[in-house]
Image: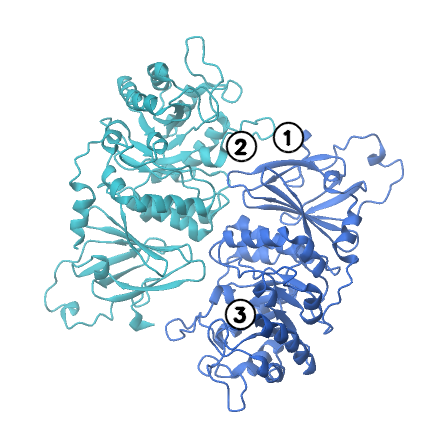
Chain colours: A cyan, B blue
Amino acid sequence: MHWTVLVLASGLLVVTVALDNGLMRTPPMGWLAWERFRCNTDCEHDPKNCISENLFTDMADRLAEDGWRELGYVYISIDDCWASMQRDEQGRLQADPKRFPRGIHRLSRYMHDRGLKLGIYGDMGTHTCGGYPGTPLDKIEVDAQTFADWEVDMLKFDGCYSNTSEQEQGYPRMSKALNATGRPIGYSCSWPAYQGGLPPQVNYSLLAKICNLWRNYNDIQDSWDSVLKIVDWFFDNQEVLIAAAGPGRWNDPDMLIIGDFGLSMEQSRSQMALWAIMAAPLFMSNDLRTINSGARSILQNKMAISINQDPLGLQGRRLLKEKSGIEVFWRPLSNEASALLFFSRRNDMPYRYQTSLSKLNYTMGIYKVSDVFSGKSVTLKDSSSFVVSVNPTGVVMWYISAPAKPRPLTHQFSRGGRFEEFGRGDLANAIPPVFL
Amino acid sequence: MHWTVLVLASGLLVVTVALDNGLMRTPPMGWLAWERFRCNTDCEHDPKNCISENLFTDMADRLAEDGWRELGYVYISIDDCWASMQRDEQGRLQADPKRFPRGIHRLSRYMHDRGLKLGIYGDMGTHTCGGYPGTPLDKIEVDAQTFADWEVDMLKFDGCYSNTSEQEQGYPRMSKALNATGRPIGYSCSWPAYQGGLPPQVNYSLLAKICNLWRNYNDIQDSWDSVLKIVDWFFDNQEVLIAAAGPGRWNDPDMLIIGDFGLSMEQSRSQMALWAIMAAPLFMSNDLRTINSGARSILQNKMAISINQDPLGLQGRRLLKEKSGIEVFWRPLSNEASALLFFSRRNDMPYRYQTSLSKLNYTMGIYKVSDVFSGKSVTLKDSSSFVVSVNPTGVVMWYISAPAKPRPLTHQFSRGGRFEEFGRGDLANAIPPVFL
């Protein structure tokens, strides 16, 4: 199958319309508190790590000063456990007065002053998952207005403590209420994760009309196992999910845990690469004050980010699951480019995977191939056999430019069928076996 | 229970006698090819990584030149897939002539010239696990003599392709045959791993008489899951295993995979610490030519190594499995010292575990506590409550010196019951909560 056919099947023919707030035309990027800091409210004993305004201003300073913002990481998002246990006398949510003494509005101004955006968390139900005040149906309008009054830029709307019918009313109603405030507020819906993530329970056409992104599946934990479970679920269900995604409407496989405690460097590159293939929101949940340089350079990889942020917004797919444990993924990009990803599920040693571009649906001749993590480039002919060495739990990710235009017959590439010029050891992991 | 009682229960009363070759009075340390390089025999396409004499001389150079040898990492061990498919005309094993053109004897001299020792691999059975020639019963004497003629220093004797009764004859017979050569050859027996690792199938008293170390359980793979399965098995069966171990006779939970692809830095510290508690052989299986500095510094941690190599040779134990996911381990050391290890099985965020030394059987007053990975020290009174912050999948490991001798009454520690002096933020992870 020629790859443009896959492009069409992937999304161009899907007529779903995204939520009409003009936001998040590419997957949102930023930082989200939950995975790394959870519901730690013990500011007395753990002042640097508890959910408090200091945590968010600390992270905002890092986003603004350490090169993150310029790369697109602009959302800084509060998760659960920020609120006071009591609404105020007007029935409005308010922040915990001890941990957020200056309130959420001051926090959003702090973000805006630094070119960042503030996200907040609510819950469609009587209580949040952590037991804080939720947003039952009759509070949706007042809470939406409160968030707008605070000049918040995004809302993650969880679904603990509500039933199916309440969610069915509440999620669309919050979308309408946010729009009605007149403030553009990105809307992240946890709804499908509470419905099992798949049709017929989940109506992705409806979701695309009311939400900018949605959590389809379980929360990520700080482990490679958790990443693998998420990856498998998303690609096992890729036909449904690819059709749902596009500019302004994104599947959300949950936060990046790169820089935390559970992933090796290989696994960190794998999460970054797979999230780029999935056109997933890139919300880091880590401690930007102490992150090591290896994790930082993965999260700040410009080519991986540009693949993730491609303006076409087509979610990629798994092409192959080999018996060897190698899996191949592919995402079509603008300008006739694409991303190709080789991923190893093995736990032994680097695996030398032999294939050719034509076996992976590239049939237009000669391509320029750039390795995302090494930065090296080579040209490869579609029919040339090559070997990539993929580390256990690791990836090799390529950005593949548009096929070269036909060249005059005098050019070397047109003489005969030999392609010794391609990949002579320049590209770390793409080596035609004839040169080994 | 006072901890000296545990010491007695742990091993001093066990009368098992170790194999009488005088070797491995502390757990052997070095490098073993298997986990990282497996049965890669493709020297044509992968010359740097195939099982060949170059791989072993490369690693020997690194052991000798990069500070490993001086720390005790002196064994460099060949695993499966080294042999020619044919025995020689005298019926002796011989190395693959293409991959080991200069033979094993030249390789052992190469090691000895550099102050290292060479380990080799054989299999009690018709074939090795990789399908190379094994050592059936009638070849035991000739193979033992061949290894001695080659001046080999250790034999790992696997058990593929033999039945229970052949193993029962073969493992003791190889021990006798090695001793009969007159050359001291460390003897690593895979036998118990083929018997399920536990009595009554396994006779640990017999093993201690015939082997220096033995593989009790499954092969390690390059994943945290694999490390956890091994750790759980060894500590779930600690009563049996602790009694079996001692100078010259060691349980072997398999290789260190630190520096490979599957472990985070936290997990790498955890494997090093848990292997030290277990008095386990420290055979790295990694690529010492390219190992990163983080992994190297964990493997070269002098305090962890000195705990592992303690001359008493008492294997440590798990003291506690808390509902929080914190587990506490302890190993008695010479000079009335001990090692204490806090390990987190959590996958969320650092956990603040509160306890006191007296809750962990330390009842002799004031102790000096040194953090193995930070190098910092404090003194702690047995009854003082403290908090350690343990990262997900990570450890905090302490070396605890002998209790302080009683001091004259004028000393500050004798006045009243307040212990503000202890741990005032000096020891990264041991902070009496009063100071937080």
Q: Which residue is mark 2?
A: A49
Residue plotted at (28% across, 33% down): A24
Residue placed furthest toward the top:
A89
Q: Are marks 3 and 2 on the same chain?
A: no
Under circle 2, the secondary element is loop
Tell whether label 2 touches label 3 (CB within 8 Å).
no
Amino acid bearing label 3 = Met
In this view of the protein, which residue sits in the foreground, B188 or A71? B188
Q: Position of residue A106 (x, y in %)?
A: 43, 20
Q: Chain of mark 2?
A: A
Q: Chain of mark 3?
A: B
Amino acid bearing label 1 = Leu
Q: Which residue is mark 1?
A: B436
Amino acid bearing label 2 = Asn
Asked if residue A410 can be seen in this view, the reply is yes
Q: Chain of mark 1?
A: B
In this view of the protein, which residue sits in the foreground, B91 or A434? B91
| Residue B434 falls in image quadrant | top right
Judge from the rendering whether residue B220 lies leftward or rightward of residue A70; answer left or right. Answer: right
Where is the C terminus of chain A found, in terms of image quarters?
bottom left
Q: Is residue B244 above or below residue B397?
A: below
Under circle 1, the secondary element is loop
Judge from the rendering whether residue A73 lies leftward or rightward of residue B302; answer left or right. Answer: left
Q: Position of residue A98 (x, y in %)?
A: 53, 19
Q: Position of residue A127 (x, y in %)?
A: 44, 21
How would you rate the neighbour count of disc 1 (Cα within 10 Å): few for under 14, some for 14-19, many for 20 or more? few
Q: Is residue A287 above or below residue A135?
A: below
Judge from the rendering whether residue A262 lies leftward or rightward of residue B418; answer left or right. Answer: left
Q: Which residue is mark 3?
A: B59
Q: Position of residue B309 (x, y in %)?
A: 69, 60
How would you rate the neighbour count of disc 3 (Cα within 10 Å): few for under 14, some for 14-19, many for 20 or more? many
